[in-house]
Image: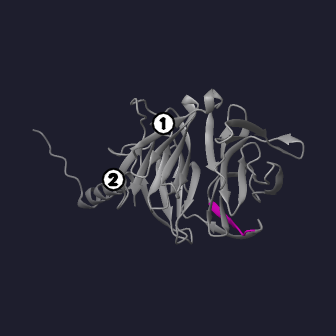
Amino acid sequence: MRIKKIIPPALLATALLLAITRLAAADGPGWKHLFSLAADQTGGHLLRPLGLFIDAQNERYYVTDSGHDRLVSFAKDGQFRQAFNAGGALKKPIDLTRLTDGRLLVLEKGRDTVTEINLKARSVTPHALEYQGRRLAPRRLKLHGGRLYVLDQASGGLMTLDDNFQVTGRIACPGCRAGFADFSFKGDELYALPQLGHEVLVFDAQGTLARKIALTPAPEFPVSLAVDGEGGLLVLERHTGTVASYLADGRLTGRHLGAEQPAGGLSYPAEIQIDPWGRVCVVDEGNGRVSVFQP
């Protein structure tokens, strides 16, 4: 005689709750996948994209296609616009920004430089950065308030640069062994994410630590940070391929996306940003694309 196994109602309810929780973590409540920045005019896809610059004025996305040694631009609606390799001069570009005079600044991992591209003069000039006699390994670059900020991978410190690409200051991570993983801005404040990711440090315009935001619970394998207009925090988790969202006081509100999501699932994502139109953009290195979501 076959005995039918009866699952206790309490155990069944727990299992159902866990399944719902996993589904919510994968899909993210209210997050809609809009499109991906992935293919050029030939249908060729990005290979190991690592950085994103959003040009609000011209409504363009610029992606560093490090595997193909080029920069690729897309329109606001996700349509391909142009691919550019500076005459073959780029060596593993990983991040970029644009100055107000139109010059492009590209971080090249292949040379560990900030490379200045003057499109009008058709010139490409790499700048090696040094601090206290040590060569820097720049891995993230942002322009804010007329000042250049570079994240040095070797020390984990944040450096400020002048117009001649000389280091003018350093923002250290107090009590951190490995330094910062990423940084972002809201108004005049700089938000910095330590490698371990259990808190976010907020600095004022002079680089003085203003406050700390404890993240509860802490994210797993944090790699990138974005701050919304209300001070809410989005922390990108590289190995889980999820985004943890927090209130301005550090309380977790949800986990979004995930590798198992049918549309827009992430694989070893590298960077997260919020674009000027309120959309969340994730540089998805493993899948060779930048996925754009409406939260």
Residue at the outermost left position: 1
The question of residue 203 being in magenta is answered with yes
Location of residue 259 in the rendering, given as x and y in whole percent from the top left corner: 41, 43
According to the picture, the residue beneath numbered tag 1 turns out to be 286
Question: How many numbered marks are there?
Answer: 2
* Nearer to the camera, 13 or 75: 75
Location of residue 75 in the rendering, given as x and y in whole percent from the top left corner: 44, 48
Secondary element under disc 2, as helix, strand or loop, is helix
Q: Is residue 54 above or below residue 42?
A: below
The question of residue 291 being in magenta is answered with no
Residue 23 marker: 2
Q: Is residue 103 above or below residue 28?
A: above
Residue at the outermost top position: 88
The residue lying at 74 percent from left, 40 percent from top is 137
| Circle 2: residue type | Leu
Choose top left, top right, bottom left or bottom right for residue 94: top right
Q: Are marks 1 and 2 in contact (CB under 8 Å)?
A: no
* Nearer to the camera, 70 or 188: 70
- Highlighted magenta segment, given as a residue range: 199-205
Residue 225 marker: none
Location of residue 71 in the rendering, given as x and y in whole percent from the top left corner: 55, 38
Secondary element under disc 1, as helix, strand or loop, is loop
Q: Is residue 220 in sight in this rendering?
A: no
| Circle 1: residue type | Gly
